[in-house]
Amino acid sequence: MIPTIYFLILSAVLFVMGTVGFLIKKDLITQFMCVEVMLNAANIAFVAFAASTSSFDGQIIVFFIITVAAAEAAVGLAIILLVYKQKKTIKSEDSSLMKG
Amino acid sequence: MAVFLFALLSITCIGSILGMILFKNQAYCALFLILAFVCTGGLFGLMNAPFIAVVQIIIYAGAIMVLFIFVIMMIDIRRGLTPEKKKWILYPSLGIGLILIIELIFVLNRALGSSGTQVSEAVGSPKILGKILFTKYLYPFEITSVLIMAALVGAIVLIKDKDKT
C-alpha cells in the first residue's frame, strides 16, 4: 500500500503550485483556475487523512467542498464577465481602481 | 502496482498544472486543468474513495470546467489581454511558494503523527457515505442546497441586462 505521507506531499506541492500560479498569472480566468487547484489540493489532503484514520467524515467534507466550489465558480465567472463588460479587459492589474 | 499508478497519476497532475501556469492561452489552460482534475479523480480512487472519485470527474472535470470554457468563449482574449506592465512579481512569488511548501510539508509531517501511516483498506462505498450524509450531516446538506440556490440567483442577477429589465 501507499504511505499517506506521499499523498500529503502531493497535496502540499499542488497547493503551492496553485498559490504561485495565482501570484504570477495576470488574467482573472487563470487566477480563478489556480484557486480551483488549491481547493483540489485541500481535497486530496482531506481524503488522505480520511483514508489513514479509516473514517468517512473526510470524504463527506470533500463532497461539500466540491459543491461549494461549483457555487463559487458560477458566481465568480459571472463577476469576471461583468468586469469584462465594463472595462473590456480581464487583466487583474487593470482593474485596480475602486471606482466601479 | 499501486505505487506505480500513484507515480504516474501524480506526475501527470503536476505536469499538467505546470503547463497550465506556463501557457498563455486560456483555452489550453482549461484543457490542462481538466487533465489535472481527472488525475486527481484517479488518486481519489487509489485512496479507496470511489464515490468522491466519480463526483470529482463529473462535477469538477465536467460541470465546472464547462463553465470556464463557456466564459473563455465569450471573452475576446486578444483584446482583453493588454501588454505586460510588471515583471518583477515572479521572483517574490517563487520565494513565497518555497517558504510555503517547506512550512506545509513540516506541518503535514507532524500532523500525521501516530494516527496511521498507511492508506487503509476500508472502502468508502456510496451506501455508507449516503447513510452518513443523511443522518450525521443532514443539516449541512440542506444548507448546501440553499447555498447553491443563492449562487444560482446571484449569477442570474449579476449577468442580467439592467437596461431592459
Image: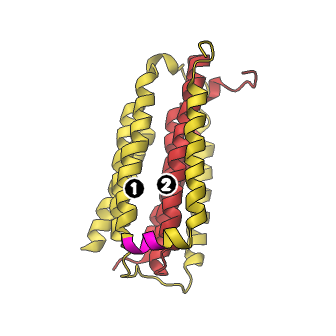
Chain colours: A red, B yellow
User: What's the chain of the residue with tag 1?
Assistant: B
Spot occupied by residue A53 in the image (x, y as percentages of width and height): 49, 81
Which quadrant does the C terminus of chain B fall into?
top right
Q: Do pointers 2 and 1 mark residues of a single chain?
A: no
Give the x, y percent position of residue A39. Answer: 52, 54
Tell me the residue that label 1 is attached to.
B56
Alpha-carbon span between mark 2 and mark 1: 8 Å
Q: Amino acid at mark 2?
A: Ile
- Quarter of image, res B72: top left
User: Is residue B18 in view?
Assistant: yes
Q: Is residue B27 above or below residue A64?
A: above
Give SS at disc 2: helix
User: Callout 1: helix, strand or loop?
Assistant: helix
The one nearer the camera, A74 or B117, is A74
Residue A54: in magenta span: no
Q: Residue furthest bottom?
A: B114
The residue under the point 49% across, 54% down is A66
Left or right of residue A100: residue B55: left
What are the residue bounds of the magenta stretch? B127-131
For the point 61% across and 71% down, the residue is: B107
Label 1 packing within 10 angstroms: few (<14), some (14-19), many (20+): many
10 Å crowding of disc 2: few (<14), some (14-19), many (20+): many
Q: In the image as oriented, which residue stretches furthest toward the top?
A: B163
Look at the numbered discs 2 and 1 and tell me whether their residues touch, using CB distance below 8 Å.
Answer: yes
Q: Position of residue B98 (x, y in %)?
A: 57, 56
Residue A66, labelled with which disc? 2
